Image: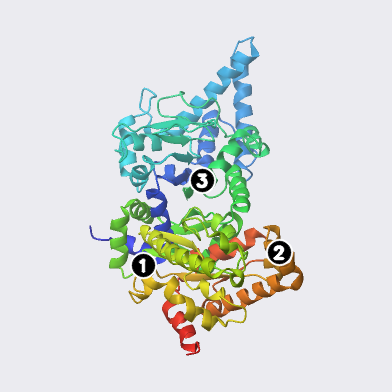
Amino acid sequence: MTLLSTEESLLRRHLKAICHLNFAVKRDGQLGFILGAGVSRGLKIPDWYALLEAMEANLAYKPSGKDGPQSYRGEQLFQFYRKKRIAEFVIADREVRDAAINTGWRRMVSKHLYREYIKADGKVDLAAFQAAIEGHAYLRELARIAIDLELVITHNFDNALEMAVAATPSSKAANRRSNSFWKPDPFLRPEMLNIYHPNGYTPTEGVKGSDSIVLTEANFADHLANTNNAEANFLLGHLSNKTWLLIGHSLADGTLKNALRLHASRRPGHISYFVHFVEGGEDDLSVEQRDAIREANFTTYNLYTFFLNAEEISALLRLIHKPAADLKADITSCSLEPRFVYYICGAVSSGKSTILSHLRSIATVEEWPDRMPAAMNKLSVDATPGEKKEIDTNLDDAIWKKNEEINDTKVGLVAVDRAPLDFIAFPDKDGDAPEVTAKNRYEKVLKRFISADFANLCPGQVIFIQTKPETLLERQIQRGRPSSDADLLSGKALDALKYQQDVMCEIYEPAIADKSTARGDCCSIATCVQDVIRIIYFGTHVPFNFKSRLNDFLGSAPK
């Protein structure tokens, strides 16, 4: 199928983000949606402000002001309604009376929520509502993805998503259906789409939804105050195990913002995506405005921001839903790359593995696909000849297997622990220059790449972790290294780490010159990880020329 101009434009502006979202969709439904009022606005469902205004008119209530918090305005309206209904009811039992009042309140919300579709008999015209869903700019595209996901969170009261999903076939099972709920379940229902309505649920079928609606100040305050309650823990828990795409939100929901902020501090390498709706497209905002919004969302909430109109949202959803092979073909037809590989490099104990552990939402490749040789716990110069041979054999195999694992990801972002030239920083003998190490070991360690003149090596950018040798030694000691007190007392362990760090800096000097670096000490792990993800998501991808750099060392080696 021919790539539409809107789709090509999105690929050129947000290629990495689209590749990552497509990867999340195909990774057994590891994508999740968080939906706001902007989605339902396309169905003429009123937002919070318009809903309250319509209900105020219905009840002939004039609020003291409309510019304050809408939840407080809603609380005033509810108390006005409640007092009016108490005067009308002749019910002695207070609990029964309050239940009747709350049910009447929810009926009123429902009536005004679906006011565009109410027939003369007071019921919702389901055919008209379904037709509106079919004509929505992107809801059908969203449903095609959502039906195969595990969880969608919607802050909307309506059941438009449920109806869209019900009319959408699943690629997983012919009878796959959805489960709507508004109180956090300890376990999601398997083999179906779970749709969570934290603010309450008022479906078109009447009052068969939630027993309460978060529309008033009291409800809203309870949500915000109970930061350790089931709702907050449910949201925070699921933020951590999926890649999320927020659509239709203005980031005005306090509960969501609190959860996003807390999640960003706990999982600094976990990026979610936010659609900032712009009616006329991103050019309606200046470059300075977009940069400020993008930076605020990233720094505060770990959100990558799209600036999109309705047509572009539809195009984004089509792209991320495509089979990986089809998206790869589309991307390459635009002379773009479908995969972005990042080699995380640095001395032993620089923090590489810790950083990688924070990047699990993208594809990751560990340092050792199989068990690491025990001799790797020694200083390289202290290994016996037999151990050195074992290390090089295992290293050759590991580098090859890691390369194959990278190739398994056709579309997406890949973070790899260590790069193919790291071995140069681990000499066979004390006093060996890095050129000598490169010459003595490259044919043993890289033989399968050398035979193909490096054509089979997955290209990727090096991100170098800069860490002081003293910090490296401290971390080594905490992990039970060096292997002897003598090495520590003599300074041999520190000298080895200084040498290793210096050689690493020399090997990856081109990456350091390009500022493809992260701080490995003198800052929190969150700051270090944010250095890395800023490069991954916002930097230009610059593949490192491993072949050329190896030749630099081999050319300098003594004959």
Note whether residue 537 is visible: yes
User: Mark 1 belongs to which amino acid?
Assistant: Glu
- Kind of residue sitting beneath label 2: Ser
Horizontal relation, residue 44 to residue 69: left or right: left
Q: Residue furthest bottom?
A: 559
Question: Which of the numbered marks, if any, corresponds to residue 484?
Answer: 2
Q: Which mark is residue 205?
A: none
| Circle 3 residue | 241
Q: Tell which of 166 and 139 is nearer to you.
A: 166
Q: Using the image as rendered, state which of residue 320 and residue 127 is in the foreground.
A: 320
| Location of residue 222 (image quadrant) | top right
Question: What kind of colouring is applied to the model shown?
Answer: rainbow
The residue at the point 54 percent across, 54 percent down is 270
Q: Is residue 307 above or below residue 152?
A: below
Q: Amino acid at mark 3?
A: Asn
Q: Is residue 59 above or below residue 525?
A: above
The image quarter in which residue 133 lies = top left
Q: Quadrant of the N terminus?
A: bottom left
- Give the quarter of the image for residue 333: bottom left
Indicate the secondary structure of the residue bearing disc 2. loop
> Where does residue 185 sit, x and y in percent of width and height?
53, 30
The spot of residue 475 in percent (x, y) is 68, 62
How far apart are labels 1 and 3 at the CA level? 27 Å
Q: Secondary structure at mark 3?
A: loop
Residue corresponding to mark 1 = 337
State the image coordinates of residue 160 (x, y, percent, origin top left).
Answer: 39, 36
Q: Badge 2: few (under 14), some or many (20 or more) residues near its Cα, within 10 Å?
A: few
* Residue in the foreground of this view, choosing between 34 and 528: 528
Residue situated furthest right in the rendering: 489
Q: Residue furthest left?
A: 1
